Amino acid sequence: MPSSEPVDDITCQSRSPGSEEANEHTHLKLKSQFCYPGWDATFSSRVFLSLYEEEEASEHPEWPEEYDMMDMGSGFLFNTSETTHTHHPTIYFMLRLFDSIRGFHKGYLDLSGRHPERYYELQSQWNRFLCGLLSFGAETRTSQERDSFDIADSRLKRWRRFQIKWHLPESTSYGQLLKCTQSVLRELKQHPVPEFQVARLTDLPVEVLDHAIGLASTAQAKALSCTCHKLNDIGQRHIFRTWHMKLHVPPHVTPFNVEYSDIDLPLLAHYSRQDLEKNAEFVLSAPHISHRVQKLVLTDEWWVNRRAHPHDNNPFALGMDFYKSVTQTFASVLRAASNLSTLALYNLEISVELARRIAETPTLHTLELHLCHIPHTVRKKLVADATLVFPQIANLRVYMDSSFPETHSQWYSLLLCPHIRTLSVVQFGGGPFPAPDAVFWMKCRLNNLERLSLDNIDSGDLAELAEFLLNSGTAMAYLTHFKLHMDWGVPDSEVLTLLLALQTAPLEVLVLEGLAEAEFVIFEQIISQYPDLVALTLVRRQNRNQHHNKFALWPHASWEYASYFQGFKALRHFCWNFRTEYWDATPSTLLAFESGFSSPSPSAKDHLDFDLADEVPPYFLDSHWMALPFAAHCPTLQSFSLMDRTVDMVCRIHRSAITGATALTPKYYPTHSSVSWNVQQWNTTASHWPILSPLAKPRSG
């Protein structure tokens, strides 16, 4: 239920067509001032509020002013005095008018709401359109009686003026427009009285609105904020939580076509930097926005294209002086964001100056490095000098790609962030990674590490990391969560080596995704080392072609594995991808046979809770019964799950305080659906554990 205060300077959905020209200048002004993060600076999607606005935008894509003045073929600027911006009219203008008047009379409309003020304005436009159309029709019937060339030419000119006035394309005929108008008039005859809105969204308390917008996506929050001043004030606290700054490469420029064209890349880089500087100027000039930024995303697309170019004579290479000013621009926004908590760097070179600016941001606690590069000079300084560090960073996420060996230098971020509590390392590609220097592992300290996630880590890196953990006396003193995810199956021998390296860690949550064999020896080792484990997740790869967490055949029966669980003292959750015949269902009638047709069925009541309101289903799936042997051997077990890409089934385990009888409550989730049950406490989402706050006083080890 929309609000009653439409924002005057933003074109709202179904706004009367006559006001569009009046608001065009204001709309462009808002766009040029970067009303929302990343509009021109990042070429991101805009907010569509008007009817058919998205269809219009797809036919007339908007580009920054600098690129509009540029000849895409030559890379040079046109004379701005001779440049005109022409937009061809479309039928969407009239369709918006038709559907808007329908919406008021039939009781449906848009985010702007059905209010008398908007209706009177819209009705005025509708009446003017009808008068013009009927006047033209009357003249047409009169001229048909005395047809001549001059009269026909005059009629065509008059029709063309009518098309221009109402933004109609030349292909639109009078008959087509008349037919559509008659259709609207028939609907208005059926619904002669407009339905105005009584209840409004803004009638809700501010706390409720704030919570609702907080649950919305950024795009949805933008759309709501565009509707009225009240929602705009609330929405700004959410839509500016993340701010993107990008050194952009225009989409028409790629590493594959640049050498076959005469595009002036230095000039393009100049305008990309100007665009970046405008983005920064807007943040610096608006403290009410910079103070709301909690996550800052810095991206260099020129570095991406430089990597992708196949030749040594790289046209995307930019000079040191160029990047010096870019770094200063990034640093200025870092200083202005006084409440910044997360910094994400994409394809950037972490210079000494940038590192110092990051270290000077006291509120920062999470750092993400996506395919970045730490140059040799910085790596040498990190090894020799321990003063260049980020002591406030508690969460570090690193993403590497074997196709770009320089991204492997991000391992040195462990020296930059010596006090991290969570660490996530994600590696892409199938090629080998260059090994870090031996002195790196000698200087590495992870005395505060509590949660570690390794995703598709290279075998060489995994071996070196395991050796480091084994030889380090303090790196695992507080490690409670560990996850290893591998797309390719890992032999049991390598898994055992890794478990031995982790034997001194006080693990509570263990996740191993990618077991190649999954024999009993893995269970024996886990139970021997971690009898106080709280959650365990095991995923097997059925063969070399299976790379996802799908159901897989295990080498033994499920109840044979269950017998090992009697060694756990505090295990509450177990999840694995043991394949069962999903459609091997048991008819509920069989439970009646087992109970001697007593009512209700004691078997169903004592052991199974279907969580249905009215009726018992005609059958039930058998996969959850697999939990009974595990629950019998492990009295502390509270939930049993099956994984098929996501959590496919969660079986809650309840025990009667009087009789001790076990009852199961299964809940099935369709594959790839969002799981309402919070499994993040036992496993990661997006390859990283939930963030932790920095320690008031880091542990010395």
Image: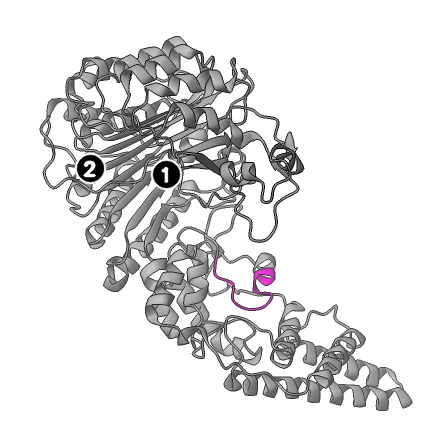
In which quarter of the view is residue 440 placed?
A: top left
Kindly report the secondary structure that dominates the magenta region of the rendered protein: loop
Amino acid type indicated by mark 1: Ile
Q: Amino acid at mark 2?
A: Ala
**Are the residues tagged 2 and 1 within 8 Å (C-beta)?**
no
> Would residue 53 be counted in the magenta stretch?
yes
Q: What crowding class fits label 1: few (fewer than 14 Cα within 10 Å), some (14-19), or many (20 or more)? A: few
Whether residue 464 is visible: no
Determine the secondary structure under disc 1: loop
**Closer to the camera in the image, 259 or 609:** 609
428 horizontally vs 151: left or right: left
- The magenta stretch spans which residues? 46-56
Q: Is residue 612 above or below residue 624?
A: below
| Residue 658 image label | 1
Residue 223 image position (x, y, % from top left): 46, 64
Q: Residue 331 in the image: state x and y as whole percent.
A: 22, 47
Residue 108, how many percent across, how many down? 60, 74
Residue 658, visible in the rendered structure? yes
Disc 2: which residue: 355
Q: Is residue 244 left or right of residue 696?
A: right
Q: Is residue 412 above or below residue 690?
A: above
Which residue is at the front of the view, 557 or 257? 557
Neighbor class of circle 2 (other Cα within 10 Å; few <14, some 14-19, many 20+) is some
Report the coloring of the rendering: one colour
**In percent of the image, x 64 and y 81: which residue is there?**
105
Disc nearest the viewer among 2 and 1? 1
What residue is rendered at 33% in x and 17% in y? 526
Q: Is residue 632 above or below residue 293?
A: above
Q: Position of residue 380 (x, y in %)?
A: 17, 23
